[in-house]
């Protein structure tokens, strides 16, 4: 459209120049009145062509704007219908089935946040007093052949009763402190999808540097 408009404008400019030249020659009786009139008619036709081309360009621009508005509206509707996860996690299980009506804020999938895999363990007062955040730890998850490197990331300041899933009645009668062992980033990168929510296992925390304890497999080995 723009190219055609520019061509029509160039043709109008040429016809206008020829009409001006013809009028100069007519004033000196070098051409007839009919020739000058022919040039005037050509200018009028070229002007009409420019007007038509300009209108066509404007209509095309309006159509483009309308199409762009429709595309933006469709994208907005698509965004409203797109479900996004709050974290780049891994799907553990599906909460609702396809075709179900989902209320606002409803859950679709249960996700495991791979950035923060950890194990919660419980220690009595005598042992927890020897621990501090940052202490090195090892977690031997059931189903994995080798221990995983971890560290103490949290120690509860309040005692609580031993959880009911602890085996013996004697242990259930004791007050314990909750301790959180977070898997190191290197171990996360190494084991990746093998780490899942709800995994059970045994935990070890290094109490003395000279005490032998489970070795871990690093990413380079």
Image: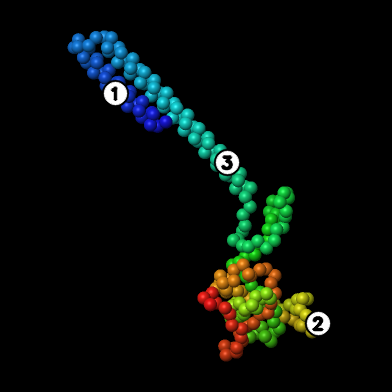
Mark 2 or mark 3: whose residue is earlier in sequence: 3
Scheme of colours in the image: rainbow
Is 182 above or below relative to 206?
Answer: above
Mark 1 or mark 2: whose residue is earlier in sequence: 1
Q: Position of residue 142 (x, y in %)?
A: 68, 76
The dot on residue 85 is none
Residue drawn at (71%, 83%) of the image: 124
Q: Residue under circle 3?
A: 73
How much space separates mark 2 and mark 3, taking CA atoms? Answer: 64 Å
Select label 1 or label 2 by which is in front: 1
Q: Residue under circle 1?
A: 14
Q: Residue under circle 2?
A: 169
Q: Quadrant of residue 122?
A: bottom right
Classed neighbour count for the residue bearing mark 1: other residues with Cα under 10 Å, few (<14), some (14–19), many (≥20): some
Apparent side of residue 185 relative to residue 10 in the rendered image (left or right)? right
Q: Position of residue 40 (x, y in %)?
A: 31, 15
Apparent side of residue 71 relative to residue 23 in the rendered image (left or right)? right
Q: Position of residue 168 (x, y in %)?
A: 79, 82
Q: Position of residue 16 (x, y in %)?
A: 29, 21
| Secondary element type, mark 2 | helix
- Please report contact status of discs 1 and 3: CB closer than 8 Å, yes or no: no
| Secondary element type, mark 3 | helix
How much space separates mark 1 and mark 2, taking CA atoms? Answer: 106 Å
Residue drawn at (70%, 58%) of the image: 94
Mark 1 or mark 3: whose residue is earlier in sequence: 1
Is 157 above or below relative to 7?
Answer: below
- In the picture, the quarter occupied by the N terminus is top left
Q: Can see residue 138?
A: yes
């Amino acid at each position: 459209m723009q190219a055609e408009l520019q061509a029509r404008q160039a043709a109008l400019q040429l016809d206008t120049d020829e009409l001006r030249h013809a009028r100069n020659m007519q004033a000196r009786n070098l051409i007839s009145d009919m020739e000058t009139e022919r040039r005037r008619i050509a200018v009028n036709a070229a002007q009409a062509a420019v007007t038509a081309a300009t209108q066509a360009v404007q209509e095309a621009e309006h159509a483009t704007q309308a199409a762009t508005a429709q595309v933006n509206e469709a994208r907005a509707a698509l965004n409203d219908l797109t479900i996004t996860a709050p974290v780049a996690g891994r799907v553990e299980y599906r909460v609702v089935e396809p075709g179900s009506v989902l209320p606002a804020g409803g859950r679709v999938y249960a996700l495991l946040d791979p950035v923060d895999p950890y194990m919660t363990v419980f220690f009595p007062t005598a042992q927890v007093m020897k621990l501090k955040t940052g202490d090195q730890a090892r977690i031997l998850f059931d189903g994995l052949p080798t221990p995983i490197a971890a560290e103490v990331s949290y120690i509860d300041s309040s005692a609580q009763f031993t959880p009911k899933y602890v085996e013996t009645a004697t242990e259930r009668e004791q007050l314990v402190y909750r301790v959180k062992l977070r898997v190191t980033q290197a171990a996360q990168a190494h084991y990746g999808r093998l780490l899942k929510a709800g995994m059970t296992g045994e935990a070890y925390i290094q109490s003395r540097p000279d005490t032998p304890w489970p070795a871990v497999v690093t990413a380079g080995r």
